[in-house]
Image (cartoon, helix red, strand yellow):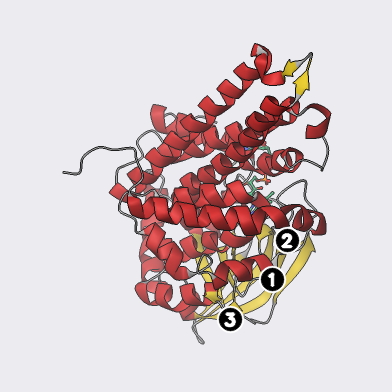
Amino acid sequence: MAEFTMELNEDQRGVRDWIHGFAAEVMRPAAAEWDEREEFPWPVVQEAARIGLYSLDFYAQQFFDPTGLGIPMAMEELFWGDAGLGLAITGTGLAAIGVLTNGTEEQIGTWLPQMYGDAGDVKIAAFCSSEPDAGSDVSAMRTRAVHDEAKDEWVLDGTKTWATNGGIANVHVVVAVVDPGLGARGHASFVVPPGTPGLSQGQKFKKHGIRASHTAEVVLDGVRLPGHCLLGGKDKLDERLARARERVRTGGARTHNAAMATFEASRPTVGAQAVGIARAAYEVALDYAQTRHQFGRPVIDNQGVAFQLADMRTRIDAARLLVWRASWMATAGKPFTAAEGSMSKLFAGETAKAVTAQAMQILGGNGYTREYPVERMHRDAAIYTIFEGTSEIQRLVIARTISDVPIR
Ligand SMILES: Cc1cc2nc3c(=O)[nH]c(=O)nc-3n(C[C@H](O)[C@H](O)[C@H](O)COP(=O)(O)OP(=O)(O)OC[C@H]3O[C@@H](n4cnc5c(N)ncnc54)[C@H](O)[C@@H]3O)c2cc1C
């Protein structure tokens, strides 16, 4: 049995330091410019691909780290560099997890390489679940996928919203309703290959933060997909739908649908991103408090400032521990009996929002300007209590899991 340790091993430290170097030397100097431009930062993603950081191999290596800490460690460093650029580099991962969670081995082997491309020809992917009337409530989804049996093709119609990389991605993973009578249990995931007619970008959103990350509507208008684009395949879908119909008939327990499985697998990863942003803001604030003098002494000499920094650091470390625990549990196959994945995302997201606000306060007037990075970090952090399930939804999941009561 492995000895218990909370130290990263030598390999992990090496990878962490390598990513930290990229974050410090490439991401940080470019962060303010791409935040202002509000465009997808292709040169930064291409540079990440050139050094092997944006690549299927890199993510596979970290994903299969037996401790479970490979991905959260990588995320924390990248988002310490910058959250908007970090999401541009990691946004494809959500679609990749959609395929990994629901696809057959053949589909994984076919689509994952097409989602990342290679250093000379970088590709990106988008995961499209949310809709204008179906955000937290995925059961309200309306995008329909209808099977044309004669041709073994699926026809998709509907509008997705808030899709990271939506419309500019090479590969889109789309969740759609295949049986409207089953609510969230009647959903299935599809891969929309590059250049498929009928898929187009709708509105591109102008955002408060993470502005280097592209977020847009995706319109599906009579999109025809060959049968093999249904993730998991038709037989598996038919079996799952038959079980769901039986449960509806007998009033049995709920099952996870495809989109929920995807979100569950990615929550600690998102929590790690929030930890990275919080740590970045805390470091700026600690440095500023030690060098800024008022009343003839550094402002950190005042307990009012120093205690804030103590609380910030304590919350960040606690958030990281929750993220690491959930990531370890996922890798070790431990059941999430208290929704520990949701817990980690909830606490880390709230921590990032609170800590970046405290950092702005510690920097005084400077904190409120774009001369210093903490106002950007605060704008970026605000998304972490909203996407991948809002904080309220995380609390709902945790409360239901610990109580077994269908709390509303
Ligand atoms: C920048 C960005 C990127 C995104 N990327 C993606 C992506 O790549 N793919 C994708 O599919 N989606 C993506 N999303 C969508 C995101 O996951 C949703 O915005 C989120 O799930 C919330 O849905 P909503 O915005 O419709 O809010 P709503 O569900 O309308 O919620 C509004 C408010 O009501 C609260 N609320 C709702 N229901 C309950 C309840 N039962 N109990 C208590 N409170 C409740 C919410 O917490 C929230 O405060 C992204 C969103 C943003 C902003």
Q: Residue at x 47, y 72 (%)?
A: 112
- Above or below — where is 381 with respect to 206? above
Label 1 sits on a secondary structure element that is loop
Q: Which is more N-terminal, label 2 or label 3? A: 3
- Judge the density around disc 2: few (<14), some (14-19), many (≥20) Cα neighbours within 10 Å: many
Q: Residue at x 67, y 77 (%)?
A: 222
Q: Position of residue 202 (x, y in %)?
A: 77, 66
Circle 3 is placed at which residue position? 120
- State left or right for residue 160 relative to residue 270: right
- State left or right for residue 73 relative to residue 115: left
In this orientation, which residue lies closer to the viewer: 354 or 216? 354
Q: Which mark is residue 216?
A: 2
Q: CA distance from mark 3 to mark 2?
A: 26 Å
Label 2 sits on a secondary structure element that is strand
In this orientation, which residue lies closer to the viewer: 344 or 241? 344
Q: What's the amino acid at mark 2?
A: Ala
Q: Which is more N-terminal, label 3 or label 1? A: 3
Q: Position of residue 322 (x, y in %)?
A: 43, 35
Circle 1 is placed at which residue position? 168
Q: What's the amino acid at mark 3?
A: Gly
Q: CA distance from mark 1 to mark 3?
A: 18 Å
Quarter of the image where ligand 1 sits: top right
